[in-house]
Each structure stands twice: as C-alpha cells, then as structure tokens.
Image: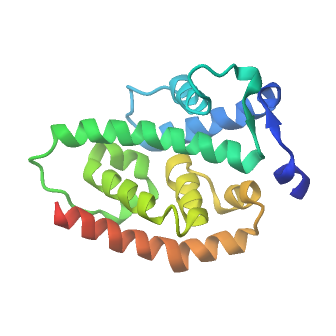
Amino acid sequence: MAEEQAAALRWEDMPQYMEELRAMARALLRQEGHAESVQVTSLMNAALQKQRRREQAWETVTWENRHQFFGFAHRAMRQVLIDRAKIRHAEKRTREVHLDEGQWANMAQAAEDVPAQVLALHQVLEALEQTYPEWVAIVEYRYYSGLTYSQIARIMGKSEDTIENCWRRDILPLLRKEVRRIVQEE
C-alpha cells in the first residue's frame, strides 16, 4: 500500500483507474437517487477536466500519488453537486429547511432535497481545508463518493479503525453543529 501511495501517476496510467473512478461516480449517482440531469460519464468527465489547466496537454498531466488523483476527482465531483445545489437552492429559497439526521448518510440526495444543507457543508469544508485537510478528504470520500471506511483507509494509507474513529468522534459532530448553525443563520 505504501508503494501505491508514493508512486506518481501519469495520464498513461489512467486506464487502470478509470473503472474505480467510474464506480465512485456510479455510487454518487446511486446515492442521489433521482439525479437524471447528471450521468456517470459526465461526472467523470467533469472530474478529469478540472485536473488540468486549459491549454495543458493530457500527456503532461501528473499526480503525486493515488490519494492526490482521487482527492482531485472527488473535489470535482463535489463541485458538480455544489453547482446543482446552488441552482436548486435558488429555486427553493422560499421553502423552510429542516435538517434530517438520516440525510447525513446520503448528502448527494440532500443536494436535491435540502440544497441549503449542502451549501452549508461546502462552507464548513472550505473553512476546515487549511486546518484539517485530512478531515475534508474523509468527508469528500464519504459523502460525495459513498466510500466505506475501508475504502477511504486504503486510499489514504491509514487503518480503517483510525478513519472510523476520526469520523465518529471528531468529524461528524463538528459537521452537524456547523451545518446547523449556518443553515439557521440564513
């Protein structure tokens, strides 16, 4: 696992990771349930397009390791959800937002049902990025890609227990508190 974490990735290496990326996009859309407007291919394309500069040739695109590649991909997928949530939020401004604890397990669906919650989560993640970048990565993997603790641990090169304990003890309580605060302030 350490070798896999340390090895640099090049564009030529992508075919071996495409199925895993496709599976992550599928999981995200499966969680979303009724996201007819986003398909697996378009979500993957968005993730890949955001990983290079506009004029950059694909052959020159590299990533430090697997964690960086999938981290960038998850952020791009997250941004697609954020953009959709902004549109939905604009449509639903007059509706009252209720935080349903069950939706924490399915944030992609929440982008449709309670876009204010998704936008609040985005604000919280942006605020945490500098101080707790690993926490942000865990949230992205968990909420936006539907990964298990085991899958996250593999990508990040940590133990499953470490990821699960951090999630339950530190991340989830903070997210609940901060998202509620932001949504209530609106």
Residue 94 placement, left or right of 122: left
Foreground pick, 66 / 164:
66
Relative to 160, does residue 19 appear above or below in the rendering? above
Q: Position of residue 90 (x, y in %)?
A: 18, 39
Q: Position of residue 2 (x, y in %)?
A: 88, 58
Residue 119 placement, left or right of 172: left
Foreground pick, 58 / 175:
58
Residue sitting farthest toward the front = 55
Foreground pick, 25 / 121:
121
Residue sitting farthest toward the left = 94
The picture quadrant where one finds residue 163 is: bottom right
Q: Residue at x 75, y 26 (%)?
A: 60
Q: Residue at x 57, y 35 (%)?
A: 26
Relative to 41, does residue 116 appear above or below in the rendering? below
Figure quadrant of the C terminus? bottom left
The picture quadrant where one finds residue 91 is: top left
- Can residue 114 be seen from the camera position used here? no
Q: Position of residue 94 (x, y in %)?
A: 8, 47
Residue sitting farthest toward the right = 3
Residue 71 placement, left or right of 144: right
Foreground pick, 45 / 39:
45
Q: Residue at x 76, y 21 (%)?
A: 59
Q: Residue at x 78, y 61 (%)?
A: 157
- Can residue 99 be seen from the camera position used here? yes
Figure quadrant of the N terminus? bottom right
